Image (cartoon, rainbow, N blue to C red):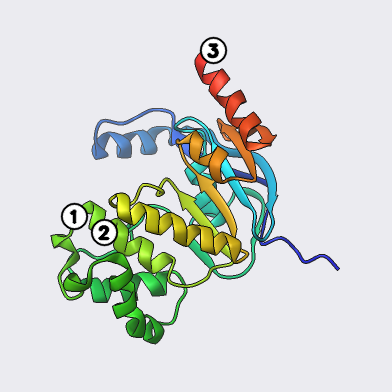
Amino acid sequence: MTSEPPIQVENVSLEYRVPRHRAGSLKETAVRIARRGIAYDLLRAVDDVSFEVQAGEVLGIVGPNGAGKSTLMKIMARVLPPTAGRVRVRGRVSPMIELGAGFNPEQTARENIVLYGTLLGRDAKEMRQRCGQIVEWAGLVDYLDVPVRAFSSGMVARLAFSVAVDIRPDVLLVDEILSVGDEAFQRKSNERMRQLIQGGAAVVLVTHQTSQVVAHADRAIWLDRGRIQKMGDPEEVVDAYSGAVVDG
C-alpha cells in the first residue's frame, strides 16, 4: 500500500478584496460607507492550483514578483486559509518564510528561541533545553542572553534558520532563504538542508535564483498571476519561464 504524500494541494485558490476607490482619509472612508458603501474588486492571488510533493522530493517554484509564490507558501504553512480548494500537509512542518518575523526584538535570543519554537508547534520545555545547541549551530553562543534588537539582520536570520532546522521535519517550506549568513554559514545551511531531504523531508523551494531550482529540485512549477503555467522537469520549466521573461 502506497503511503499518502506529505503535501497535497487540491484546486486551491485565494482571493483578496481590494477597495475599488482609495479614500484619502478615515473621515472620507466613513462618509463613503455611509452614503454608498464600499465597492470591491476581487484579486485572485492563487488560482486553482493543484500538485503533490512526495517524501524526499524537492519541488521548486519560480515566477515573477506578484505571481503568488509566497502566498501559496503561506497557505501550505497554514498562515493563510484558502478561499477554495484543500491543502493537506502531513507531519512536522518547518516553514522558512520571512525568517525571524515572529521574533520579539526586546527579548533575548534565549527567549526568542522558546517563543519561535512554540510558534512552530514545539514544546516550550524542549526548546529551553535546546537553546545551547541552537545558538552553537548558529554561531551565536556569545549572544544567547542579548536582546535581539542588538542583532544584525543576518544574525536574526541565522538564529531563525537554526531554530527551524533543529528538528527533522516531514515538510520543509523554503522561501528565498538559501543565502542566509556568510559563505561559511551558507555551506553549513545547504548541507543541513541536504541532510533533511535525504532523511525523507518533502521540500517546497521558492526562489528567484532559477539556478538553485535546476540544481536542487526534482520537479518545478512556473507560477504567474496565481496560475500554473508549466510543471515538470526543472530545467524545462526554468527555460520556459526565462524565455517568457525575455520575450516579455
Residue 164 position by quadrant = bottom left
Q: Is residue 69 left or right of residue 11?
A: left
Total marks placed: 3
Q: Looking at the picture, how far across and down is residue 111, in whole percent?
A: 25, 76
Tell me the quarter of the image containing the N terminus.
bottom right
109 and 234: which is toward the camera = 234
Question: Residue 247 got which mark?
Answer: 3
Task: Measure how far apart labels 2 and 3 are at the Cα level.
Answer: 39 Å
**Judging from the image, what secondary structure is the residue with disc 2 in?**
helix
In the image as oriented, which residue stretches furthest toward the top?
247
In the rendered structure, which amino acid carries the disc numbered 3? Asp
- Which residue is depicted at the point 25% across and 53% down? 154
Residue 92 appears in the figure: yes
Q: Looking at the picture, how far across and down is residue 240, in whole percent?
A: 61, 24
32 and 45: which is toward the camera = 45
Residue at the spot of label 2: 156
Q: Is residue 89 left or right of residue 128?
A: right
**Judging from the image, what secondary structure is the residue with disc 1 in?**
loop
Q: Looking at the picture, how far across and down is residue 156, in whole percent?
A: 26, 59
For disc 2, the neighbor class at 10 Å (few under 14, some 14 to 19, many from 20) is: many
In the rendered structure, which amino acid carries the disc numbered 1? Ser
Q: Is residue 50 left or right of residue 149?
A: right
In the rendered structure, which amino acid carries the disc numbered 2? Val
For the residues labelled 2 and 1, say whether their Cβ atoms are less than 8 Å apart: yes
